[in-house]
Amino acid sequence: MTSDTGAPVVVGVDGSEIALHAVRAAALEAGYRRRPLRVVHAFIWPLMGVPLGPAPGAPADGGLRNQAEQYVAEAVAEVTKIAAEVPVTGAVVDGAAAAVLLAEADAAALLVLGNRGLGGFAGLLLGSVAVQVSARAESPVLVVRGEPRADGPVVVGVDGSPVSQQAVGFAFDEAARRGTELVAVHAWLYPAPAGPGDILPLVYDLDAFRETEDRTLAESVAGWSERYPQVPVRRLLVRGSPARALVEQSRAAQLVVVGARGRGPLSGLLLGSVSHAVLHHASAPVAVVRTPRTVEGS
């Protein structure tokens, strides 16, 4: 886990109230990590060939470019209100939202997004930009959902896969920063293939399989518990849908952490079916964690 001040926390803004919720969450995350915060607005209009400045006879502070800069200035001002100790900068970057944010993620410690914004359909559970970026970003992505909570545990989904291990480590780090309990959730229905071509038995011992899954859960958190002895851990073994179990636990959580993809039959997808469902339905902010990579200050 990273703790230096080099790589920033990055938050995307678009002038919506949901984006301001994301800014507030990003300010807290930057404070937890003792990292700078970078506020970014993706400015797509130059790609569309439309006039960017004020219309003839309009006020000098009008036009699309000035509006974009105002979005960023408002977000920066919001940060200074709630986390004055966090160094904050803002930028208007030309390009489409997903492309700009994915480029920003390359050098970020964490990328923070609202669950939807001005560019999407308000009735959707999750905006298209948040889905695209969560699926492909190199950094962990925090999608801000629901009402923020100062209490409650950090919840993490566990399935024994390498990506799941990164999610567990991220979750322990978050729980330690927040001074709260970690709830490790492992849900199962029936034996899952460990890899391509794996042949599953037609008949299996349910009790023996339950013991195997319990051992997977215990082993997944054991090493991290040694590294973070101050974090209380509650292991939750559930027979049922992993997505449903995590969504249920999200109702009392201050954060839910999932791997970008897991060990199931769709593990080759950029965003796994469980993480996709949790992003759409969780009642708490959701962090999507990918395989580790090195960033400045890591």
Image (cartoon, rainbow, N blue to C red):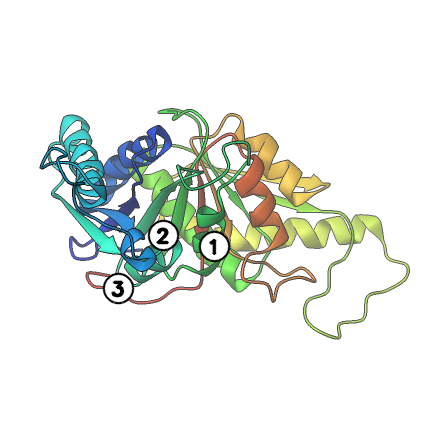
Residue 14: quarter of image = top left
Q: Residues within 10 Å of mark 3 (few under 14, many from 20)?
A: some
Residue type at tag 1: Gln
Discs 3/2, front: 2
Q: Mark 3 points at which residue?
A: 295
Q: Can residue 109 be seen in this view?
A: no
Which one is nearer the viewer's eye here, 20 or 204? 20
Q: What element carries label 1?
A: helix
Tell whether 123 sits left or right of 63: right
Which one is nearer the viewer's eye here, 81 or 187? 81
In this view, the residue farthest toward the bottom is 197
Mark 3 → mark 1, Cα distance in angstroms? 21 Å
Query: Which residue is depicted at the point 62% across and 63% down?
Result: 267
Query: Which residue is depicted at the point 45% across and 33% down?
Result: 145
Residue type at tag 2: Ala
Residue 235: quarter of image = top right
Q: Where is residue 241 in the image (x, y as percent from the top left)?
A: 70, 42
Mark 2 → mark 1, Cα distance in angstroms? 10 Å
Mark 3 → mark 2, Cα distance in angstroms? 22 Å
Q: Position of residue 278 (x, y in %)?
A: 56, 41
